[in-house]
Amino acid sequence: MEVNDYSYWITLAHLPNWRTERINNLIADIIHNRKISFAEFFSYDIPALQKDFGFSLKEARDILQAKDNLPDNLSLAEELPSQGFELITFDSTKYPTTLKNNLKKKYSPPLLYVKGDTQLFFEDKVAIVGSRNVGDKGVEFTKRIARKCTSEHKVIVSGYAKGVDKIALETVIENNGRGIVVLPQGIMTFKSGFKKLYEYIIDGQVLVVSTCHPKAEWSVSLAMRRNTYIYGLAEEIYVAESDHKGGTWSGVIDGLRKGRRIFVRKAAPDEKCANNELIAKGVIAVDEFGDVREDSRNYDGRLGRQKTLFEI
């Protein structure tokens, strides 16, 4: 793909206030249905966009305003590879099939910015998630699951946040395993993180990925959105410890709606966490070793799958 093409992808991928599905449908319409170039698309004026694409006046204006960003995005498209970053578009063979299968066109980000060995996208992957202020039992569970997954040659997916995320990744690295870090910020703003992870990225142990605009700073909203992609990249999800609100809780609830395979550590009665409430909502209960508890009413051992909300 030419550098110019990437500048168009960057521009469309970050259309402000456009839903992901709307962006993906537009890109598919341009490339596959109309079979026109991005340059031709951006040559349309407002009346033509309204007539030919059925855009509202606001949508047509959004496209024209986005067009003004093309020069800056062309500079980004040239700068990113020079810094060792790779851009992976939704229609690329390098785009992770797990993400596409789990999130579909509705939620799959149209463009990924990555650094590291992209082959990790195509290995068996497990997400280990949980609270920033995780307790001792959650810490031990996180380490145990991370070591187990590493011994089974599975890739750990985490968000590099304080608490469970970093504990999982650090355990993987210590045991010569492999991990994918999903950022809640632009890949060009993760400078301190790259310094810490540099040798592991070079060795092929760690792959860093961002769906945000390359220069986006960390924000709460991006951190919340990032959780969707952590869950989307993994075949299985283990919850070490969840609060009654926040990213882990909302991510699990969203995952349940999407029919994801989620396991949560059964908490002791004296623990002040929301693990058992999540189990009550339909998540599969596991013991401190990550094994499904025999009393878990949310798991059908005969079918080897999680029961749906309608079966509970």
Image (tube, rainbow, N blue to C red):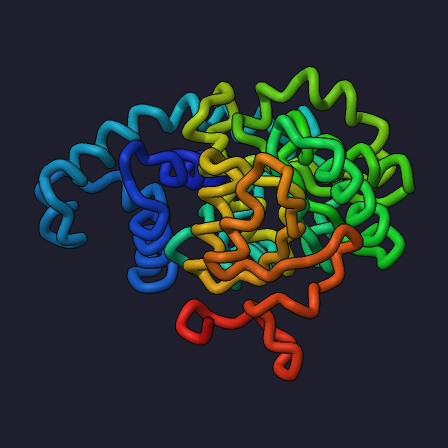
Give how far across and how far down residue 71 sits, in percent.
40, 23
Give how far across and how far down residue 233 sits, in percent.
60, 52
Q: Nearer the viewer, residue 93 or 272?
A: 272
Does residue 267 appear in the picture of this structure?
yes
Answer with the quarter of the image where residue 189 lies: top right
Give how far across and how far down residue 281 sits, in percent.
46, 57
Q: Residue at x 67, y 24 (%)?
A: 83
Answer with the quarter of the image where residue 96 lies: bottom right
Q: Residue at x 24, y 39 (%)?
A: 43
82 to 158, vertically: above or below: above
**Outermost front residue:** 270
**Outermost bottom residue:** 302
Q: Residue at x 80, y 26 (%)?
A: 198
Q: Nearer the viewer, residue 60 or 301?
A: 301
Q: Is residue 71 left or right of residue 193?
A: left
Q: Residue at x 63, y 57 (%)?
A: 263
Q: How many marks?
A: 0
Give how far across and how far down residue 169 sits, in percent.
76, 36
Answer with the quarter of the image where residue 199 lies: top right
Does residue 4 appear in the picture of this structure?
no
